[in-house]
Amino acid sequence: GPVDALDSALLKQKRQIEVYLPAESAKDPSGRYETLYVLDGDWNAHLVVEIVEFMHQVGAVPPLIVVSVPNFFDEHGVNSRDHDLTPTLAPERALSGGAADFLAFLKTELTPYVDAHYPTNRVHLIHGHSYGGLFLAYALLHEPGLFDGYIVLDPALRWDNHALDAALTEQLPGTPTKGKAIYIAGREGPAFEDMGIASVKSIFEA
């Protein structure tokens, strides 16, 4: 997909994105498509694009725009994901706790930019794995209306001694989910316990 970038006033960074348009967009200039944002895009986007293309070929999903949201590396080679995707400042992680700013970036800078420059229909979906899944749990608590579909895979909900568990227990029942698709999955085995999903399974079930 073509590489694009926007200057984020919130993050004080020039953030690159990569946008994959469906084949249909070349044939129909008036077409408008749902948009799937992929966190940790530097290593997840190509896989997601292949799956989306396959699922579209077999008629399982409509044509989608996929927006890769890669991590930002500063001049010292420090990866932004430990800051952007974590909701609290954990004692052992000096760079953590930037989820509020990153969520504001998605809401007020990135999604409006993509909607203004690409043939979207303003239906926004988002994919997050591990820290990305942790971030999406945070997004569901704070800006549930921002995305219409949440794909949350192996969320690292053990983060900061299960920092989000209490808020999830309290806020989930009142979260406006009408018309939304929220899919949360974790691998069986050690990862299910180690990522912290086991403890929140009962919260979501309740």
Image (tube, rainbow, N blue to C red):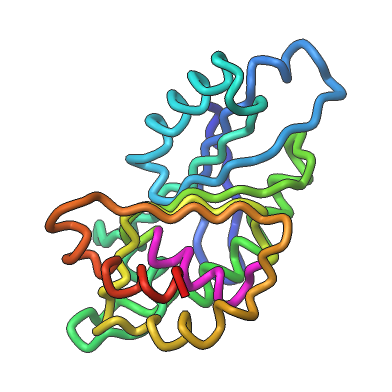
- Residue at left offset 69%, top offset 45%: 114
Residue interval drawn in magenta? 133-144
Residue 201, x across and y down, in percent:
36, 68
- Residue at left offset 42%, top offset 44%: 41
* Labels in figure, total: 0
Check residue 123 for magenta coloring.
no
Asked if residue 81 is positioned above or below residue 68 in the image, the reply reads: below
Asked if residue 1 is positioned above or below residue 160 in the image, the reply reads: above
Residue 116, x across and y down, in percent:
78, 45
Camera-nearest residue between 189 and 120: 189
Check residue 135 for magenta coloring.
yes
Q: Is residue 160 left or right of residue 14?
A: left
Q: Kindly indicate the quadrant of the structure image that contains residue 199.
A: bottom left
Q: Which residue lies furthest to the right in this view?
A: 30
- Residue at left offset 55%, top offset 15%: 58
Q: Which residue lies furthest to the left in this view?
A: 190
Residue 62, x across and y down, in percent:
66, 27
Camera-nearest residue between 13 and 134: 134
Camera-nearest residue between 54 and 7: 54
Residue 101, x across and y down, in percent:
53, 74
Q: Which residue lies furthest to the top in this view?
A: 27
- Residue at left offset 63%, top offset 68%: 144
Q: In this view, does 91 lie to the left or right of 63?
A: left
Report the magenta stretch's main SS.
helix
